[in-house]
Amino acid sequence: MVMIDEELMQRLRDRMVRQQLEARGIKDQRVLEAMRKIPRHLFVPQHLVERAYDDYPLPIGEGQTISQPYMVAWMTEILKPEPGQKVLEIGTGSGYQAAILCELGADVYTIEKNPLLAREAERRLAQLGYFPRIRIGDGTLGWPEEAPFQRIIVTAGAPSIPQPLLDQLDEGGRLVIPVGPSGMQMLTLVQKREGKLVTEEEGTCVFVPLVGRYGWKEEERGRFF
């Protein structure tokens, strides 16, 4: 069992926000406060606790990662979640992004393909007092019976934007997703305005593959990633 100095962890979070987020242009104060509050070290394996606030993604098992802190803040700032909005997250992973969304007051629905990661994330989130709805399954299909969603965030790289997610985006909604091949994707914002989809490219990023019916196939994952 790793002994955790909570005062040290808070200092590391404060430094993370100053040096990794504010210094790179993250301006949304609600996002910064959520990142300053959520104990990221609880979302990484115990042997990586001392690296939890470093400036890069970390492995969480099952071939998945917890995203770089800046990437979490950047995607959340682009998403612009508001309190009470229904937000669909594709790729629960460690649960860290879901915790940020819950802290911002969103009504979070999150889908994870891997049952082990989903269960661990649910336990972790409950310990912190967050209770998003979690589904185990193919995130590229979305969550049709709960649609529409005012916000959708995808935390894995897709070859293209899954059509079910576009269909489940509410009027006036925002969808943030990395799109492109392995090694480099384009972080893409889709907004639905008067029934039409408006797409903007926000910048390059690198994510693990989004596997599913409307994403990469398992055999492609092994070939390209």
Image: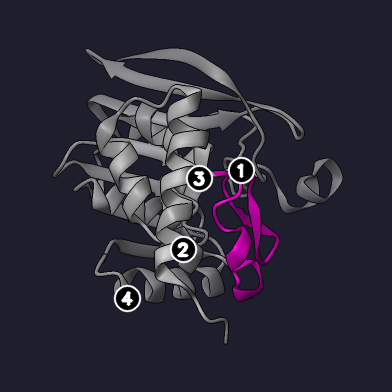
Give the side of residue 26 with respect to residue 158, left or right: left
* Residue shown at the point (19%, 36%) measured from the top left: 82
Residue wearing tag 1: 55
Please state which amino acid type lies under the numbered disc 3.
Thr
Give the side of residue 219 with respect to residue 209, left or right: right
Which numbered disc, 3 or 4, marks the residue that appears first in the sequence?
Answer: 4
Reply above or below: 194 against 102: above
Q: Residue furthest bottom?
A: 1
Residue wearing tag 3: 140
> Which span is picked out in magenta?
45-68
Q: Nearer the viewer, mark 3 or mark 4?
A: 4
Where in the figure is residue 214, as x and y percent of width and height?
A: 57, 40
Which numbered disc, 1 or 4, marks the residue that appears first in the sequence?
Answer: 1
Where in the figure is residue 192, as x and y percent of width and height?
A: 30, 19
Give the side of residue 203 with respect to residue 136, left or right: right
Viewer-proximal residue, 41 or 123?
Answer: 41
- Determine contact: label 1, label 2, CB under 8 Å: no
Please state which amino acid type lies under the numbered disc 4.
Gln
Residue wearing tag 2: 8
Q: Nearer the viewer, mark 1 or mark 2?
A: 2
Q: Is residue 163 visible?
A: no
Q: CA distance from mark 2 to mark 4?
A: 20 Å
Kindly state the secondary structure of the residue where label 2 is placed. Answer: helix
Q: CA distance from mark 1 to mark 4?
A: 25 Å
Which numbered disc, 2 or 4, marks the residue that appears first in the sequence?
Answer: 2
Please state which amino acid type lies under the numbered disc 2.
Leu
Q: Nearer the viewer, mark 3 or mark 2?
A: 2
Q: Residue furthest left?
A: 84
Q: Nearer the viewer, mark 3 or mark 1?
A: 1
Residue wearing tag 4: 127
